[in-house]
Image (spheres, rainbow, N blue to C red):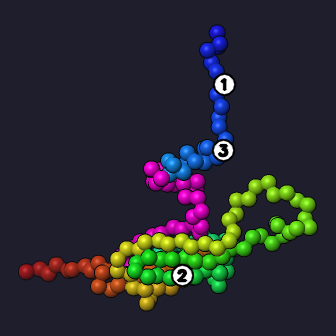
Amino acid sequence: MFDDLKRFETGSSQQFDWLNQLLDSFFPDRNTMDIRAVPRGSFPMVNIARSDDAVRVYVFAAGLAPSDLTIDVQDNVLTLRGKRDTVKGLHEDNDSRQVLRRERVSGEFVRSIALPEGIDVERSEARHAHGVFEIVLPKREELKPRRIEVQAA
């Protein structure tokens, strides 16, 4: 009855990773709400919000101290640069443990993010709390929306 059904090879995980990267390059917005949708190597992860007054960038970088992150803005490009060390004790030579899975990235990183026109870099500021950096980039005053009151004639 089931003689015509055949087993099929599922392929190696490298082939699936390659296919996933290929799909990401053709469809960059697929699964945008899924944590796995962040392109490989995108560290630190960010959320960006815009209001009438400012652009806010939230940088999720657990394990980084404020001195570990350099923030630059030039030509409407925000650049995050730094280095995250490996977890102490994980890679010691005298340890007989074998690492089975490593999901936390470490090493040097650079991430650049295009910003909208009209950012007032001189008034920008950054704060850090609980592994989250908040970068506030105010808009220039002349670009903020203004309400015009209608006068009765």
Point out the frontmost of discs 1 and 2: 1
Q: CA distance from mark 2 to mark 3?
A: 36 Å
Query: Badge 1 local density, few (<14 within 10 Å), some, or many (20+)?
Result: few
Query: Which residue in the protein does label 1 denote?
Result: 7
| Residue at horizontal 90 percent and vertical 65 percent from the top | 95
| Residue at horizontal 45 percent and vertical 70 percent from the top | 49
Residue 117 is covered by the magenta coloring: no
Q: Indicate the amino acid at tag 1.
A: Arg
Query: Which residue in the protein does label 2 denote?
Result: 71
Q: CA distance from mark 1 to mark 2?
A: 53 Å
Q: Which mark is residue 13?
A: 3
Q: Toward the viewer: 143 or 52?
A: 143
Q: Are marks 1 and 2 in contact (CB under 8 Å)?
A: no
Q: Indicate the amino acid at tag 2.
A: Ile
Q: Indicate the amino acid at tag 3.
A: Ser
| SS at badge 2 | strand
Tell me where the magenta segment starts and ends, as one range.
25-54
Q: Residue 17 in the image: x percent, y percent?
A: 60, 48
